[in-house]
Amino acid sequence: MRYGMVIDLDLCVGCRTCAVVCKEHNAQAPGTWWNRVFTPGSKYHQIPAEAEGGFSMYYLPVAPDPVL
Ligand code: SF4
């Protein structure tokens, strides 16, 4: 059996708590982040990307592939 996790992107506020908890739980080495949270379209986290007609911002949490 394989487990999966579903994240409602409409509810994600980009706080990166999932990344911090994953790092702590798995005792990852300094500088290692298996979970990451991106702000698509922007070079910086939580800075909106310029979009046609204004600005756009949402967050994209990315978990590691458990098979790797
Ligand atoms: S960054 Fe992670 S912990 Fe924070 S709201 Fe989004 S999915 Fe939840």
Image (spheres, rainbow, N blue to C red):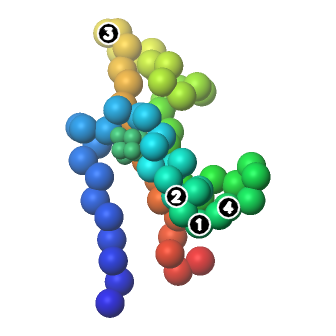
Which one is in front in this view, the residue at disc 3 or the one at disc 1? 1
Mark sitting on residue 26 = 1
Q: CA separation, marks 4 and 3?
A: 41 Å
Residue type, numbered disc 4: Gln
Q: Are marks 1 and 4 in contact (CB under 8 Å)?
A: yes
Mark sitting on residue 13 = none
Mark sitting on residue 53 = 3
Q: Which residue is mark 4?
A: 28
Q: Quadrant of the C terminus?
A: bottom right
Where disc 2 sits, the SS reads helix
Task: Please tell me whether residue 19 is drawn above or below residue 5 in the rendered image.
Answer: above
Crowding around mark 1 (Cα neighbors within 10 Å: few <14, some 14 to 19, many 20+) is few
Quadrant position of residue 52: top left
| Numbered disc total | 4
The percent coordinates of residue 32 (x first, y second) are 70, 54
Q: Which residue is mark 2?
A: 22
Crowding around mark 2 (Cα neighbors within 10 Å: few <14, some 14 to 19, many 20+) is some
Residue type, numbered disc 1: Asn
Task: Please tell me whether residue 47 is drawn above or below residue 26 in the rendered image.
Answer: above
Task: Please tell me whether residue 64 is drawn above or below residue 16 in the rendered image.
Answer: below
Residue type, numbered disc 2: Cys
Q: Are marks 2 and 4 in contact (CB under 8 Å)?
A: yes
Q: Are marks 3 and 1 in contact (CB under 8 Å)?
A: no
Q: Are marks 2 and 1 in contact (CB under 8 Å)?
A: yes
Q: Quadrant of the N terminus?
A: bottom left
